[in-house]
Amino acid sequence: MKYYKEYLLKNGKTLIVRSPEENDAEEMINLVNLIDTESKYLTREPGEFAYSAEDEKILINKRDTAENILWTVAVIDNEIVGVAETSYNNRKNRFRHKGHFGIFICKKCWGMGIAGKLMLSHIEWSKQQNLELLMLEVVDTNQRAIDFYKSFGFEIVGTVPHGMKYSDGTYADEHTMVMHLTGSINSDAGYIYTY
């Protein structure tokens, strides 16, 4: 599904949230590999991302035509600095009402408001798809992310003990968080958005 929206960030820069294009494949792979080294909270160890540029192009085209997936990149000054995805099961009516959300931003862009704008874009799209719930998983030690999600109305509804195992043999618990897509949500800028 094609998507495009522009936002003005707190620092005066323009953020473009848009669907990825084939020519973004190499840059997206480089971003994923960078972010995997910057954060211990993601699902991959550094070096585990095994997609080639050709694989990524195929994935971009496949997701671009899917009605049940919104995959977006965050672009500042012609550089992709983040990625977000929301998807839902459109084949099973009993699960058609809930979407799954994921996001990552490169470390140099943390605190700029990018995640909040991506979140708003994905919430808006989810509402247009008539979704009732958005779900995500987050490592229990990632308090910054947990607080961010809570500011939008997500709540912790369960925890999987040892849900993530690191290559050094240590574990982290994993929270499942859910947001009901009715009522008001808070943005990272302190505004309240009502849907």
Image (cartoon, rainbow, N blue to C red):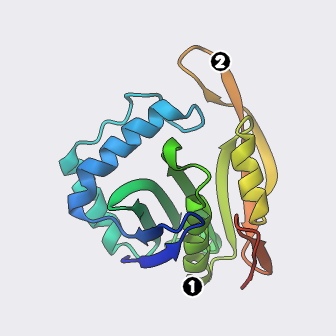
Is residue 154 among what the camera can see? no
Q: Which residue is drawn at 55% across and 34% down?
A: 39
The residue at which mark 1 appears reads as 128
In the picture shown, does residue 122 fall above or below 176? below
The residue at which mark 2 appears reads as 170
Query: Which quadrant of the figure contains the C terminus?
Result: bottom right
In the depicted view, which residue is nearer to us: 34 or 64?
A: 34
In the picture, measured across the screen, residue 105 lies left or right of residue 153, that is left
Expressed as whole percent of the image width and height from the top left, the position of residue 124 reads 59, 79
The amino acid sitting under disc 1 is: Gln
Quarter location, residue 65: bottom left
The amino acid sitting under disc 2 is: Thr
Expressed as whole percent of the image width and height from the top left, the position of residue 161 reads 75, 32
Q: Residues within 10 Å of mark 1 (few under 14, many from 20)?
A: few
Q: Which residue is drawn at 46% across and 39% down?
A: 35
Q: Residue furthest front?
A: 12
In the depicted view, which residue is nearer to us: 79 or 173?
A: 79
